[in-house]
Amino acid sequence: MNLLAEYLPILSASLVIGYLFHGALLLPERDGKFLASESYRRMAYFSALTWLISSALLIITSLREILGATFDTQTLRSYLTQVSLGRVQLLQLLVSLLLVLVIRRIKGNGSSLLAMLLSSFGLSAPFIESHSGDAGMHGLAIGSIIIHVFALSIWIGVIAGFLLISQETLLRVNQRWAAIAPWLVVAVLVSGLVNSWTRMNFRDAFTGDYARILALKVTLVMLLLGLARYLRRAASRSQFKTPLIALELGFLLLIAFVGSWLSRTEPAIRGDILSSDDLRALALTGVRFPEEPNLWRLTIAYEADGLILGALIFLTALYITGVVRLARRGVKWPVGRTIAFALGISAIDFATSGGFGVYAIFSFSHHMMAHMVLGMIAPIGIVLGAPITLALRALPSGRDDQERGLRGLLVKALSSKAVVLLSHPILALAIFDGSLFALYFTSIFDSLMGSHIGHLLMSLHFLLAGLLFFHVIIGIDPRPRQYPYIFRIVILFAAMSIHAFFSISLLSSTTLIGADYYQSLATPWVPDLMADQRIGASIGWAMGEIPILLSLIATFIQWIRSDEREARRIDRASKRAKDLGEKDELDHYNDYLARLAKRDEELG
């Protein structure tokens, strides 16, 4: 019963995600709205309803399994609000409820994409608690299982959708699916292997139920790959066979069921001897205490955050694919932009999985180092890499004249009201610097540091806030509105002043930031938490000013180059006008001044 209760939300959510994926990227569209049959829309609604019911059932069965007995409403309320597993299950329930309310109203590509991301978040949330911190490699285990579930759910949902669309539509859909499917296959295989590796002690890996179930799952995946390859070849000859599609779906559903079975089976845990300090660190953070930091250890330390690492690998692969696609068209992408993007990606990895990322969860001063890299340094490299411009040039257009395609979807998003609002320099500055006070001078920081998902959300906030701010100020990519350079310089000086004020406030504060978390952690090589906090404030001040100064220099250079381009444009226009015997812009401006002077004389 408990296994079925875990499996049903995965199955129903996969059908919902597949429908939304079809709507966002695969189904034919007209005027930004995807064309889905009424039967497919009904199936999506009932799948969302099933997800809602099965999520409620999962909460009940999980609590009953924990207590081993019946429970009352007060116990249920405490479970959903105070226990981490209960909170993420409640989150999944709320997401499924929202989908039930809105899925019939979702008709546009953009709204379908947003709903798909929200659904994926809701499905993945309970898996955050699926790996015991005592087993170690917490970040890698959590990230790999989330990627595995996300990729597998899309695969299941898309193939299920194939059975509900016409043969003609299926042929069109397969044009894009054939390009996307290999990415999902790689994600499923690699994430599954990595997750199994993080859970098992390979000295005892080939004995026990976990190893046998894992072998069954691997066998099913290999058979599935062979069948999927045959189907893709048949699709290239326009010979889709419904029974074979149903067979592929059956394999996928069986693999998902075996995966749920595997998640409920205890693996052969790595049997390392742990000290009391390590046990405390594992319970709170999922990793052991690293050795006392020095330059060498900060350089070589690495504890992979699976979700962020997977996202970075995916984004890098997309960037390289775009550059290669342009090269095949004979368009040379600037090498400097590629290098800038690579440096930005490397900085993010170093601040989340590398030395700064490893030590950031144990010391406030190292947390501030990681924060500055994520919010101040990495975004500069990313925005100078011009990924949006690359995407606009490399993404395919619609499959016919009436489809806007992926490129059109991106153009629509860039000109949306939300982007116009967010890209205003004052709002970008408020998010960039104002959120520092909200985070560090309230209880939010303590709450976020105490959980893996909180730490992840904090890292994403630093990165996205930095990307937005530097995109508005020094970005190469297109923006809804170009603001004067002098205005950007004023914003940069304001950012520098606000950041300095924040650092001074933190430096002079007598209140310990994140007191509950750091006192519970009791890092052996941080004897004085307040002194470590002051060091972090000083680091934040120093590391925060340098990128802004570099941005000021970059803005001045862009301003000079813009003036030079404008001067060359005026010279070309003037030469063209003189060659044609016409007045140029300067002549028109002089005539305008003469008319003003004549009018003043007449009035005077």
Image: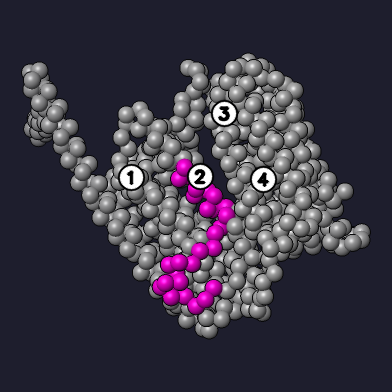
Q: Position of residue 37 (x, y in %)?
A: 69, 21
The span shown in magenta is 290-317
Instruction: Say which label, 1 or 2, has the lower sequence index.
Output: 2
State which quadrant residue 168 falls in: top right
The kind of secondary structure element at disc 2 is: helix
Q: Position of residue 39 (x, y in %)?
A: 74, 23
Few, some or many residues within 10 Å of mark 1 (<14, 14–19, 20+): some
Tell me the residue at 85%/51% (across/down): 2
Q: Position of residue 460 (x, y in %)?
A: 52, 54
Q: Is residue 415 magenta?
A: no
Return the residue at label 1.
337
Distance, label 2 to label 4, CA atoms, is 16 Å
Q: Which mark is residue 178?
A: 3
Q: Which mark is residue 149?
A: 4
* 247 relative to 22 in the view: left or right: right
Does 21 sit above or below residue 145? Answer: above
Tell me the residue at 69%/40% (across/down): 221
The amino acid beneath tag 1 is Arg
> What's the magenta bit mostly, secondary-structure-wise?
helix
Instruction: Say which label, 1 or 3, has the lower sequence index.
Output: 3
